[in-house]
Amino acid sequence: VSPSLRSMLAFASCGPSAHAMCLGVISACASRPALPGPQNEWHMDKVRLMDKSLRKIAGSALLPSPDCSAAHAINLASNEDLVIIAHGPEEDPRLSYATRAALDLWGVDWDTLVALPAREAGIVGQRGAEIQDRGYLLDFRGVGTAKGGGKFLVEDAIVWDLHEDGDRSKAFLGQAAMVLRRNCRPLLDDDLLS
């Protein structure tokens, strides 16, 4: 496990003030989900899906245990340092999950972000075939587009597929990605050269 992945995972199970901002992509819903809150248990099902898939595919975890309480989902959803976004398995998926930090990074509110097709808000990178072959990628680099068209560079992100029970032989339910916030920055002209 890379040092960056260890850092992200250590912060994922901590309280909001201890997180070091990550980015991620996930979902299992086709309709626009409601803002995470007590009425929907902070989307605990999605958080568990991400966790279970990451555990089985990459041997790492988001949650301290697979059966932890919704309090851990609250930490993820409301965290201002950990960026997670998600989409489902649809042919042209829309985002369906985002943490507070993700909303801040994209510069939008929940309703705006979950209305976006993943291709419009998503992180564009060059290594989709590698993710498809292995089910995950630990050192993804790509470019995101914030509200108003501003671009940001994402480096050393983790991207992984979501499957029923975390089992790649079962139904594909979306994709997730995360990155430490310090690895997200405005795109500069010099970045286009590297």
Image (cartoon, rainbow, N blue to C red):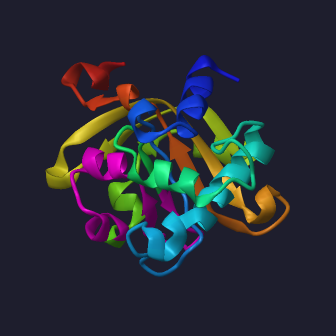
Does residue 15 sit above or below 71 in this rendering? Answer: above
Residue extent of the magenta highlight: 86-114
Identity of the residue drawn at 49% across and 64% down: 42
Identity of the residue drawn at 37% across and 19% down: 194
| x, y percent for residue 126 | 50, 39
Does residue 79 sit above or below 188 in this rendering? Answer: below
| x, y percent for residue 16 | 42, 40
Q: Residue furthest left?
A: 148
Does residue 65 sit above or below 170 in this rendering? Answer: above
Q: In the image shown, does 66 or 171 lie closer to the viewer?
A: 66
Tell me which corner region of the image, top left, top right, bottom left or bottom right, holds residue 18.
top left
Q: Note whether residue 176 is visible.
A: yes
Q: Quadrant of the N terminus?
A: top right
Identity of the residue drawn at 34% across and 51% down: 100
| x, y percent for residue 137 | 63, 37
Identity of the residue drawn at 46% across and 76% down: 39
Does residue 156 sit above or below 103 in this rendering? Answer: above
Number of numbered discs:
0
Q: Please say whether residue 27 is one of the residues in the magenta stretch.
A: no
Q: Note whether residue 20 is visible.
A: no
Q: Residue furthest bottom?
A: 31
| x, y percent for residue 159 | 58, 43
Q: In the image shown, does 8 or 38 lie closer to the viewer?
A: 38
Q: Please say whether residue 111 is one of the residues in the magenta stretch.
A: yes
Q: Residue furthest right?
A: 169
Relative horizontal placement of residue 186, taking residue 178 as reference (left or right): left
